[in-house]
Amino acid sequence: AQSVTQLDSHVSVSEGTPVLLRCNYSSSYSPSLFWYVQHPNKGLQLLLKYTSAATLVKGINGFEAEFKKSETSFHLTKPSAHMSDAAEYFCVVSAVTNAGKSTFGDGTTLTVKP
Amino acid sequence: DAGITQSPRHKVTETGTPVTLRCHQTENHRYMYWYRQDPGHGLRLIHYSYGVKDTDKGEVSDGYSVSRSKTEDFLLTLESATSSQTSVYFCAAKGGPDTGELFFGEGSRLTVL
């Protein structure tokens, strides 16, 4: 079994300040973890992924995430928010032993204030 | 979008009518998925396919059926649409169960009156 909990449904930051979106996961197997971003009326786009290599993962647009097995967390961060970062973000867990099915968190809406 | 197209992109229908959503991919991905997205629920898996004519249920499969007669096409059918099936439906695909990236279509917005 696997599950994902995104700890904040909404996060609001000012432009130029750091972003932290929190994700905890549960998996019976060695998981792969992903963050996807969804802009309004669009499909989902991969930001970054962890697949048992380096625990600090860098993604597109300056985002990164750190896999912490002891805390079962995979938080997404960015040093400086940009207006274009305003979107919905999904944390996803997947395991090959689960027929590759992915389980999504409920999403975090990021608002960036000027 | 990596070659995933969905049709129709928008549809309004009435309760009790059948509806079919189509997903077409051009990258020869083996695995294909249908999700629905509702506010506060993230994406929930309806059905998935791991090859031609090989499909299985996801977590919210009641009221839905799927078919995959060709690698490139994955159809989602609502046999008799209900208002609770008003949602945005996303198709996704990937090459294998190796936990790689999912590629998404742009979604199909379905309204059932």
Image (cartoon, rainbow, N blue to C red):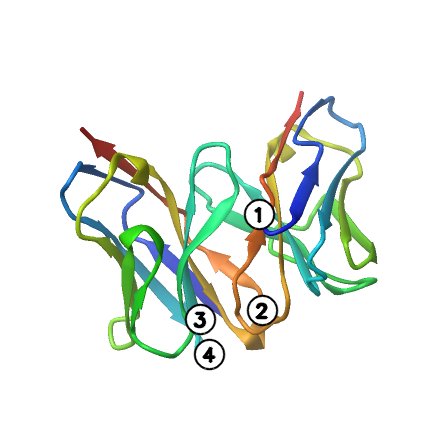
Of marks 1 and 2, the one in the foreground: 1
Q: Is residue B22 left or right of residue B101?
A: right
Q: Are marks 2 and 3 in contact (CB under 8 Å)?
A: no
Q: Position of residue B90 (x, y in %)?
A: 60, 44
Residue A100: assigned label: 2
Q: CA distance from mark 3 to mark 4?
A: 9 Å
Residue that label 4 marks: A29
Residue A32: assigned label: 3
Instruction: Classify 10 Å Cα crowding around label 1: few (below 14), some (14-19), many (20 and above).
Output: some
The residue closer to the viewer here, A93 or A45, is: A45
Question: What SS does tag 4 mark?
Answer: loop
The quarter of the image holding the C terminus of chain A is top left
Q: Amino acid at mark 2?
A: Gly
Q: CA distance from mark 2 to mark 3?
A: 10 Å
Q: CA distance from mark 4 to mark 1?
A: 29 Å
Q: Position of residue B73 (x, y in %)?
A: 78, 51
For mark 1, name the chain: B
Q: CA distance from mark 4 to mark 2?
A: 12 Å
Q: CA distance from mark 3 to mark 1?
A: 21 Å
Report whether mark 3 lies on the same chain as mark 1: no
Residue at x 25% of width, y 71% of height? A71
Badge 4 or badge 2: first in the primary sequence? 4
Residue that label 1 marks: B1
Residue B19: assigned label: none
Of marks 3 and 4, the one in the foreground: 3
Q: Amino acid at mark 3?
A: Ser
